[in-house]
Image (cartoon, rainbow, N blue to C red):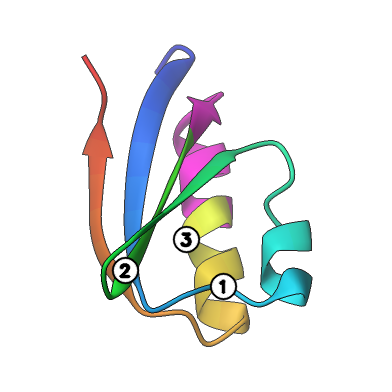
């Protein structure tokens, strides 16, 4: 897997602490959800990001590669 941009859609709004965990991503608030997007280095990095969401109790709605 090569570096690829991904969009992560999560439920609700992120707190300041949660935002700090994803400083390398662009964070955009949408009604009832938050969108985060950024470069993912490889599959291991992708799984690490998802694990970080889980560790913070953030519900992931979708994960999509950005063309």
**Relative side of 9 to 5, left or right:** left
Q: Secondary structure under badge 3? A: helix
Picture coordinates of residue 21, whole percent (x, y): 74, 60
Q: Which mark is residue 33?
A: 2
Q: Which residue is mark 3?
A: 50
For label 2, the crowd category at 10 Å Cα-Cα, with few meaning under 14, some 14 to 19 and many 20 or more, is some
Dot 3 or dot 1: first in sequence order is: 1
CA–CA distance between discs 2 and 1?
Answer: 9 Å
Front tag of 3 and 1: 1
In which quadrant will I find the N terminus?
Answer: top left
Picture coordinates of residue 55, whole percent (x, y): 61, 81
Residue range in magenta is: 38-48
Residue at 47% x, 75% y: name it: 13
Residue at 38% x, 79% y: name it: 12
Name above or below for residue 59 compared with residue 7.
below
Picture coordinates of residue 32, whole percent (x, y): 28, 75
Front tag of 2 and 3: 2
The reply to whether callout 3 and callout 1 are in contact (CB within 8 Å) is no
Picture coordinates of residue 7, whole percent (x, y): 34, 39
- Comparing 10 with 45, the one in front is 10
Q: Which residue is mark 1?
A: 14
Name above or below for residue 4 compared with residue 60.
above
Q: Which mark is residue 35?
A: none
Residue at 44% x, 12% y: name it: 2
Q: Is residue 42 magenta?
A: yes
Q: Residue furthest bottom?
A: 57
Residue at 44% x, 35% y: name it: 43
CA–CA distance between discs 3 and 1?
Answer: 15 Å
């Amino acid at each position: 897997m090569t570096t690829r941009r991904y969009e992560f859609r999560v439920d609700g709004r992120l707190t300041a602490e949660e935002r700090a965990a994803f400083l390398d991503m662009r964070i955009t608030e949408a009604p009832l959800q938050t969108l985060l997007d950024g470069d993912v280095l490889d599959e291991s990095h992708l799984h690490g990001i998802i694990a970080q969401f889980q560790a913070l109790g953030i519900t992931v709605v979708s994960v999509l590669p950005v063309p």
